[in-house]
Image (cartoon, helix red, strand yellow):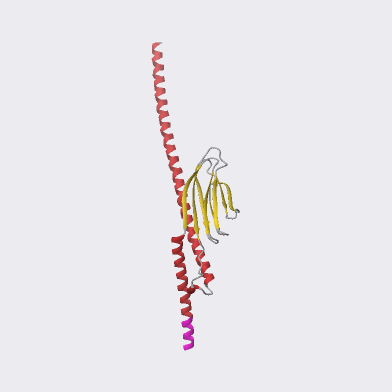
Amino acid sequence: MNLCFDDCAIQFYSSFYYFRMMFKLIFFAVLNFILNSTVLGVYINIDANEEQCFLERATTGTKMNLMFEVVEGGFLDIDVKIVGPDNKEVYRGERESSGKFAFSAHIDGVYTYCFSNRMSTLTPKVVLFTMHLIEAYKTTGNPEAENANSPKLDDMVNELRSALLSVKQEQEYMQVRQKIHRAINESTNSRVVMWAVFEAFVLVAMTAGQIFYLKRFFEIRRVV
């Protein structure tokens, strides 16, 4: 009986320790995500036949997430490319209006991402983009966490961080779309109002012209 009790107690404390450690890892992962995730959001104006590039330094395993949206100009299209420190293309897109691309840094160094409007000869483009950088979480160097379950916990924490980043990006993407659609709706409404005012002015002018013409016509008949 005592042996069974001791085994149950050992199993209970082992499970309790495992869940306590997992909770701590998840808590610190979320805290680290909030404090250390790098976010860059900016509007840029790209003239015709111009290309603008930006640099981001990242370590191996760092997740990089690029989101962009062409807000104004021409057919709302832009060329995008991402180049690694070894000058190899990580991503390339042509004539895209919007997009989201995520990848993990394969080597340490500076990654370059460029927006090109060289396909346009006259029309400038306004582009909104955000770049998220988040380093992979590891339990290495934490003696309390170094056990057989550490790799599994690392995977769970990294999946949680990826899910949080995905939700955050999706929220920002929806906010950007909302701003763009609101601007389009306001522009459309203003044009409709201006067109209605113009139609009213034309109708008033035509009515006044018809009255003047009829009045002059009858005056001429009386003279004859």
Q: Camera-side residue: 23 or 137?
A: 137
Quarter of the picture containing the C terminus is top left
Count of number-bearing discs: 0
The picture places residue 129, in percent across and down from the top left corner, at 49, 50
Residue 3 lies within the magenta run: yes
The picture places residue 50, in percent across and down from the top left corner, at 54, 42
Q: Is residue 20 left or right of residue 152?
A: left
The picture places residue 207, in percent across and down from the top left corner, at 40, 25
Q: Camera-side residue: 164 or 89?
A: 89
Identify the residue at image location x=41%, y=31%. Answer: 200
Magenta stretch in the rendered image? 2-10
Vertical placement of residue 201 versus 126, above or below:
above
Helix, strand or loop for the magenta stretch, by majority = helix
The picture places residue 192, in percent across and down from the top left corner, at 44, 37
The residue lying furthest to the top in this view is: 224
Identify the residue at image location x=58%, y=49%. Answer: 93
Residue 25 lies within the magenta run: no
Q: Camera-side residue: 218 or 188?
A: 188
Vertical placement of residue 69 versus 13, above or below:
above
Instruction: Tell me if residue 14 can be seen.
Output: yes
Q: Camera-side residue: 28 or 209?
A: 28
Instruction: Tell me if residue 1 can be seen.
Output: no
The residue lying furthest to the bottom in this view is: 1
Identify the residue at image location x=47%, y=71%. Answer: 22
